[in-house]
Image (cartoon, grey):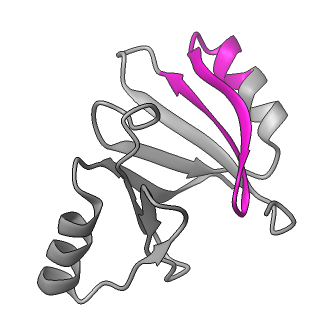
Amino acid sequence: MARLTYLELPVSDLASAKAFYAAAFDWDFTDFGPSYAATTSGDTDIGLDADPAEKTAAALPVIEVDDLEACEAKVRAAGGVITVPIFAFPGGRRFHFRDSAGHELSAMVVDPDQP
């Protein structure tokens, strides 16, 4: 079953954003390179993306699915527009799309073998 599992936030200053969320909500972050950090609670997690080449203009909801390719086909058939093709990241694979209202979202599948 598909479920909202992740919210990625674009940030300008990763250290400042991590400090804010740690102070405000006691969240711990794991660094995944110099411009990305995320909570890893196993519930709905938060990612902070400070890479200007990759970060989105707004918050990016991420929906976890069981079959990424089947989901991509269903998104296309429903009228969604793929904005970023399927790519691997640490812990899985995902793609980005725009829905019929123009919102950007992402669908992902967990793959612990992804480095």
Residue 69 magenta:
no
Q: 23 or 33, which lies in front? A: 33
Report the magenta residues as a range: 74-98
Q: Residue 34 versus residue 56: which sits nearer the camera?
A: 34
State the image coordinates of residue 9 (x, y, percent, origin top left): 32, 50
What x and y, as percent, mark residue 29?
A: 40, 78
Q: Residue at x 36, y 25 (%)?
A: 103
The vertical placement of 52 against 35, above or below, is above
Is 85 included in the stretch rendered in magenta?
A: yes
Residue 107 vs residue 17: left or right? right
The image shows residue 87, relative to residue 23, as above or below, that is above
Residue found 18% across the figure and 67% down from its top:
16
From the viewer's perspective, is residue 1 above or below residue 26? Answer: above
**Quick one: quadrant of the N terminus?**
bottom right
- Pinpoint residue 46: horizontal percent, then vertical percent: 39, 64
Figure quadrant of residue 94? top right
**Residue at left offset 81%, top offset 69%:** 112
Q: On the image, which quarter does residue 111 sit in?
A: bottom right
- As drawn, the residue found furthest toward the bottom would be 26
Q: Main secondary structure of the magenta part?
A: strand
* Rendered position, 95 above or below 22: above
Residue at the right extreme, as displayed: 113
Q: In percent of the image, x 30 and y 84: which residue is there?
A: 27
- Image quarter where the C terminus lies is bottom right
